[in-house]
């Protein structure tokens, strides 16, 4: 495991707020740096730290080349040929591979296009549920969580997670064990649209 040589805390991006742009702030040397953070609950008041568990969360630094601001808690996918370096949007393929989850500590600000950010791939993290009030939001503790389908990698419906029910479909014989995001650590119901579900991540850096 690499050290956090950037000294960049959770919830902060490299370029945002520092007067740097894509042309002046490119830092390919930072792409792929991995580190661990204590499991701290996001959304706390400034200076307040609420330790959620004694576990740690693994993160990798990636660049957002999607063309849009990436929202916290959404699942993202690697750009073609850029595994471990850059993502080009949210996940869109049902039970497809994901790079990880945009660190929930980025909050409402998210991650600006071209910026570098912490993407979580192992350990406890909040993920976003389906926007629609339906069976996709029925999640029980320990359910196996996977990416849900969406039209485009920049749409509001993309980058979301659902529970994977047991199936005999040959389509999922390999994709489910290979691409599962993790196990649910909290439960949700039909009405919990666009909500945070806590997941024990085990994403695609395996």
Image: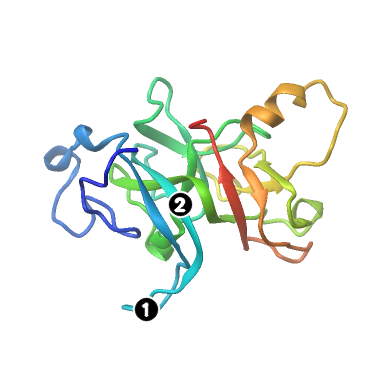
The image shows residue 147, relative to residue 79, as above or below, that is below
Residue at image coords 20%, 60%: 17
The image shows residue 193, relative to residue 68, as above or below, that is below
Q: Secondary structure at mark 1?
A: loop
> Which image quarter is the N terminus in?
top left
Residue 136: percent from the left, percent from the top?
76, 51
Residue at image coords 48%, 32%: 205
Q: Is residue 200 left or right of residue 171?
A: left
Mark pair 2, 1: CA separation? 19 Å
Q: Secondary structure at mark 2?
A: strand
Residue at image coords 51%, 54%: 73
Q: Badge 1 is on which residue?
A: 48
Residue 113: percent from the left, percent from the top?
32, 45
The label number, if any, that marks residue 155 in the structure image? none
> Can residue 159 be seen in the rendering of this structure?
no
Residue 45: percent from the left, percent from the top?
38, 79
Q: Nearer the viewer, residue 1 or 115?
A: 1
Q: Is residue 124 left or right of residue 184?
A: left
Residue 164: percent from the left, percent from the top?
76, 41
Q: Is residue 178 left or right of residue 136?
A: left
Farthest residue to the right: give it. 168
Q: Quadrant of residue 47?
A: bottom left
Q: Nearer the viewer, residue 193 or 146?
A: 146
Q: Are marks 2 and 1 in contact (CB under 8 Å)?
A: no
The image shows residue 174, relative to residue 20, as above or below, that is above
The label number, if any, that marks residue 57 in the structure image? 2
The first of marks 2 and 1 along the sequence is: 1
Q: Is residue 12 left or right of residue 90?
A: left
């Amino acid at each position: 495991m690499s050290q956090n040589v950037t000294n960049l805390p959770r919830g902060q991006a490299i370029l945002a707020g520092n007067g740097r742009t894509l042309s002046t702030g490119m830092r390919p040397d930072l792409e792929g740096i991995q580190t661990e953070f204590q499991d701290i609950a996001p959304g706390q008041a400034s200076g307040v730290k609420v330790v959620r568990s004694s576990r740690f969360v693994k993160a990798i630094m990636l660049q957002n080349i999607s063309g849009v601001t990436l929202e916290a808690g959404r699942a993202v996918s690697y750009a073609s040929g850029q595994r471990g370096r850059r993502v080009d949007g949210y996940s869109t393929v049902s039970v497809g591979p994901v790079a990880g989850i945009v660190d929930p500590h980025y909050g409402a600000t998210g991650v600006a296009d071209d910026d570098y950010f912490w993407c979580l791939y192992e350990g406890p993290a909040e993920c976003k549920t389906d926007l629609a009030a339906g069976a996709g939001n029925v999640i029980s503790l320990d359910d196996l969580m996977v990416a849900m389908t969406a039209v485009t990698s920049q749409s509001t419906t993309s980058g979301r997670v659902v529970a994977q029910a047991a199936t005999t479909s040959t389509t999922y014989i390999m994709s489910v064990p290979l691409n599962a995001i993790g196990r649910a650590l909290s439960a949700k119901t039909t009405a919990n649209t666009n909500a945070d579900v806590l997941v024990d991540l085990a994403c695609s850096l395996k």
